[in-house]
Amino acid sequence: GDSVTQMEGPVTLSEEAFLTINCTYTATGYPSLFWYVQYPGEGLQLLLKATKADDKGSNKGFEATYRKETTSFHLEKGSVQVSDSAVYFCALSDSDQGGKLIFGQGTELSVKP
Amino acid sequence: DTGVSQDPRHKITKRGQNVTFRCDPISEHNRLYWYRQTLGQGPEFLTYFQNEAQLEKSRLLSDRFSAERPKGSFSTLEIQRTEQGDSAMYLCASSLAPGDNQPQHFGDGTRLSIL
C-alpha cells in the first residue's frame, strides 16, 4: 500500500540555519503531497501542498518540490526562526483512495536562539 | 470560517466505559475524516464520510468503534468497552470534495486517556 517515510527527529538547529526535512513516498497512483505542521498543544495545520510532478509548494518561507523521479517531497527553509519549532508531517493523498491522508511519522524541529 | 471544532478536548475514563466524541466541520465542507494519533506517530486514517454516507472504514476501526454523520453536518465517533490501547488523540478533519486535491482542515483533537 501507499506509504510515507520521513527522516527521524528530533532536529535541532540554531536560529537562521538552513533546514531540510527529507520525505519520500510510495504510491501506486498519482498522489497529491502535503506538509502539515503541529505546534505544541495545537492541531495540524496545512503548511504547503503540491498536486503534480515538478510543482513547488511554498508558504511562510518553506518550500517543497514534488519530485516524481525520486519519489520525494523534501521540506526546506533558508533561515529558521525559534517560532518554527514544531512537529512537521509529510503526507500524501491518492485520488484512488478517497482523499484520505497517509502520514509519515513526523519530524520534530527545535530551533534554539 | 470558524474552523473544525472538536469536543471534548480531553476525556479521561476507566477501562470498559463507552465514550463519544463530536466533530463539527467547516460548514460548507461535505467530506469529514477521522484519524487517530498516538504519541510520536503520524495520524492514522480511521474513516470518512461524504455528506451523511460513510464511504470507507479502516481495518483499525474495530467493531467497538462506530461513527455517524446523520445529517451530513456534525459527526460522532463512539468507542464501546474502551481498552488501554484506545488511549490516543482522535482528530477530525473536513474538506470539500473531491478530497484528493482539496486540503483537509483539522480540529485540535480529543485526547482520550484510559485509566
Image (cartoon, coloured by chain):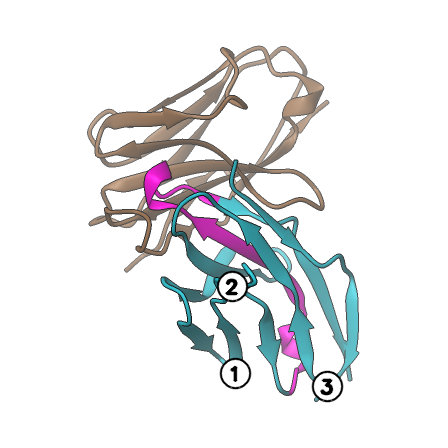
Magenta range is A79-101
To which residue does mark 3 refer? Answer: A17
- Label 3 Cα neighbours within 10 Å, binned few <14 / some 14-19 / many ≥20: some
Q: Picture coordinates of residue B29 (x, y %)? A: 24, 47
> Mark 2 belongs to which amino acid?
Glu
Q: For chain B, what colour was chosen?
A: brown
> Mark 3 belongs to which amino acid?
Ala
- What residue appears at the point 56 percent right and 63 percent down from the top-left corner? A70
Q: Is residue B107 visible?
A: no
Disc 2 and disc 3: Cα gap in Å? 28 Å
Q: For chain A, what colour was chosen?
A: cyan
Secondary element at tag 1: loop
To which residue does mark 1 refer? Answer: A61
Q: Picture coordinates of residue A3 (x, y %)? A: 56, 44
Secondary element at tag 3: loop
| Dot 3: chain letter | A
Disc 1 and disc 2: Cα gap in Å? 25 Å
Same subunit, labels 1 and 2: the answer reads yes
Disc 1 and disc 3: Cα gap in Å? 13 Å
Q: Residue furthest front?
A: A69
- What residue appears at the point 77 percent right and 67 percent down from the top-left corner? A11
Would you say residue A97 sits in the magenta stretch? yes
Closer to the camera: disc 1 or disc 2? 2
Which numbered dot is residue A69?
2
Residue nearest the observer in this picture, A27 or B30: A27
Closer to the camera: disc 2 or disc 3? 2
Would you say residue A34 sits in the magenta stretch? no
- Label 2 Cα neighbours within 10 Å, binned few <14 / some 14-19 / many ≥20: few
> Mark 1 belongs to which amino acid?
Gly
Residue nearest the observer in this picture, A111 or A77: A77
Q: Is residue A46 above or below residue A57?
A: above
Q: Quadrant of the C terminus of chain B?
A: top right
